[in-house]
Image (tube, rainbow, N blue to C red):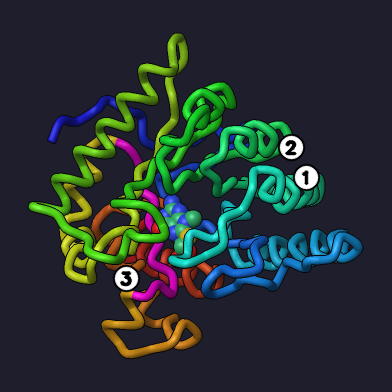
Amino acid sequence: MQVSPVIQGVLRCGAQRIDLREPKVMGVLNVTPDSFYDGGQHYSVTASGSKLLVDRALLSAEAMLGQGAAIIDIGGESTRPGAAPVTEQQELDRVVPVVEAIAANLDVVISIDTSTAQVITEAASAGAGLINDVRALERPGALAAAVASGLPICLMHMQGGPQTMQENPSYQDVVTEVGDYLRARIAAVHEASVGSSPQLLLDPGFGFGKTDEHNLELMRRLSELAELGYPLLIGVSRKSMIGRLLGRQPEQRLAGSLALAYAALVNGAKIIRAHDVAETRDIVKIFNCVMNK
Ligand code: 8Y7
């Protein structure tokens, strides 16, 4: 694989910085009614309940910050198979007030988990510091909006769409194909970034159009993706692969999540996206000790 000359180290996320010389934890904050693990916690269908829910989301973010999260990832659209689609306006209504509240009250980098151009733009002006798109900026306008924000962008690989991706995932060589896709998306971002140098993160997208064997192969050979020259972000927290490997429901998947996160750290991951920030932060600290840092 071709190596790109990218300065690994410090991400500039608007007013904040993230030093990736030591791995960081990204805490998950869903403001959806239907996410598979934490859905509904910060969501209500009544308009009168929305202020309360923003306050509750802020409390969750504050707790995660206290547990050592460097980044809080805010999502308003569930990508769970079978999840109800949301309109752009619904997504904006869910996430923008939460971004504003966190930006006004907490010193943490806010990541916006979205594929929608308008959400990228409005979240960035509300104080988001990072763009996390499971569709790698393929939706109309998303690439231009992300580039215009000047914020770091996480490009994730997915085979198919959320509704159908787990029906029959198929690859000749999963690592090569994920790498080829990410390289093409890196090129698209560079083409759209005339006169500026984009800050990119890459993610193989564990569980997004992959069998367990594909996920395990990606984990074993993660360092090959690190050779693309960009920091790797990985999300394995409580995913269904762990459920199948161990025969466990989402509430019982913490140990499996930490084991996979540690494997990812060993293989070069720089940001771990997780529901359980305190525990994930502990394994990052142990990793740093093992690495003699
Ligand atoms: C990931 C993600 C989800 C992931 C990145 C879940 C939004 C599903 N997973 N973003 N988002 N990487 N970058 O299980 O693996 O949390 S949602």
* Residue at 45%, 88% in the rendered image: 252
View extreme (left): residue? 172
The reply to whether dot 1 and dot 2 touch (C-beta < 8 Å) is: yes
Q: Is residue 68 above or below residue 92?
A: below
Q: Quadrant of ligand 1?
A: bottom left
* Mark positioned earlier in the residue sequence (3 or 2): 2
On the question of residue 206 being in view, the answer is no
Q: Is residue 264 visible?
A: yes
Span of residues in magenta: 230-240
Label 1 or label 3, whichever lies nearer to me, is 1
- Point out the image quarter for the N terminus: top left
Dot 3: within a 10 Å radius of its alpha carbon, few (fewer than 14), some, or many (20 or more) residues?
some
* Residue designated by label 2: 126
Instruction: Please tell me which residue is depicted at 47% across the width and 65% down the height of the picture.
Output: 80
- Residue 236 is covered by the magenta coloring: yes
Distance from Cα at disc 3 to Cα at disc 2: 34 Å
Q: Which residue is mark 1?
A: 100
Q: Position of residue 59 (x, y in %)?
A: 77, 66
Residue type of the residue flagged with mark 3? Leu
| Labels in figure, total | 3
Left or right of residue 250: residue 118 = right
| Secondary structure found at label 3 | helix
Across and down, in percent, residue 65 comes to: 65, 60
Q: CA distance from mark 1 to mark 2?
A: 5 Å
Structural crowding at the residue carrying mark 2, measured as other residues with C-alpha within 10 Å and reported as few (<14), some (14–19) or many (≥20) = many
Q: Nearer the viewer, residue 268 or 85?
A: 85
